Amino acid sequence: MSTHPIRLSILDQSPVRKGATAQQAIQETVELARLADNLGYTRFWVSEHHNTTALAGSTPEILIAHLAGETKNIILGSGGVMLPNHSALKVAENFRMLEILFPGRIDLGLGRAPGTDRITASVLNPSNQWKEQDFLEQLNDLRNYLHDTAEPGTIQERITAIPQALTVPPMWLLSSSGQSGLFAAHFGMGMSFAHFINPLGGPESVQLYRDRFKPSIDRAVPEANIGIGVFCSESEEVIFRQQAVMDYRYLQLEKGGRLFPIGYDDIKQVSYNAAEQERITHNRQRMLIGTPDVLKEKIDKLLADYKVNELMAVTITENFDDRLRSYELLAAMYLK
């Protein structure tokens, strides 16, 4: 790990709390972005999810435009645009427009997963064949559209992504298995490893990305960050409740059930069998939870293991005030 200062960023999924509406969830995302901007966070990425009532963020390109207008310095980006759901040309035009409106403040984070179930994904893009080669072609097309380059003899020579822009938003690939990290290395893009999805093999995947990185028109050197579930509180009781809810939510996800907003009172009487307890132990590696002194030690170790300087925190809480306070405490550790 280098001696550069630690950078803090946020990946926000606009979670819908129990008893709240999707409109409230989006307004909370706006309030959180303002707070992060004032606290000195580096990035604020928003996600793309579909066909779930638990997460309200489905159109990151629209939400980014609003958030950029509500903030002053923080970089706004997608974490990510799920590229197989979309036309590469349309993504290029969306982000060229954002870059023109807010030059130097936009990230284009991309993912290969659909951000939903297979049926919904097939409705979003009926031509999606789930092929690796198709994704690679989309990445190549997107880069060409953004840079006004074209493969000789292809239809791209006849198409210009509009509006024309003087600058290009940095491109990042989200990875949870390492494969997209290799794609990021090949195309000279940034890599964001989703430790909150897969807590195993991340440091090795990031190192392989660095080793295989090919300089591009966008980046001369590799750049990586780490996304992980984070929660900080000064109250042991609040931490206990948060851990219990997250244990349940991760099991809910693994069992393939549709996510729905829950609170601690909904799950406090739930008991788990041996197999479920084993999964809970595994899933707790996907998040860092604790009081400020405990949490800082955990974060420092994680960043050292990955040899990165940027933590991208994902925080979903039962109460919005707890979510805000967690990010404030995190900032107090590193952004003084």
Image (tube, rainbow, N blue to C red):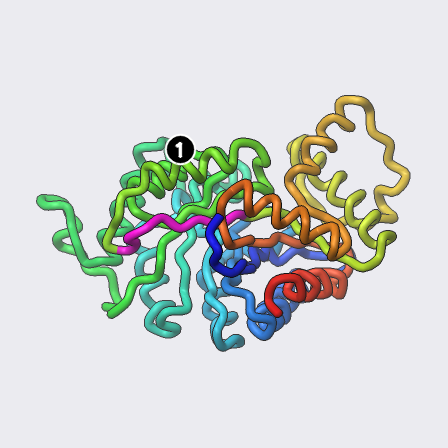
Give the dominant element type of the magenta stretch: helix, strand or loop: loop
Q: How many marks?
A: 1
Residue that protrudes farthest toward the right in the picture: 269
Residue 331, image x, y percentages: 64, 65
The magenta segment is 218-226
Residue that protrudes farthest toward the top in the picture: 274
Label 1: which residue? Answer: 130
Between residues 26 and 324, which one lies in front from this camera angle?
324
Residue 146, image x, y percentages: 26, 58
Q: Is residue 130 visible?
A: yes
Quadrant, the C terminus:
bottom right
Between residues 229 and 55, which one lies in front from this camera angle?
229
Residue that protrudes farthest toward the front in the picture: 3
Tell me the residue at 83%/29% (across/down). Answer: 272
Tell me the residue at 25%/50% (across/down). Answer: 216
Magenta segment includes 222: yes
Hey, what amino acid is under mark 1?
Answer: Trp
User: Where 187 falls versus 323 (above or below)?
Assistant: above
Tell me the residue at 78%/45% (across/down). Answer: 243
User: Where 315 falls versus 36 (above or below)?
Assistant: above
Residue 35 found in image quarter: bottom right
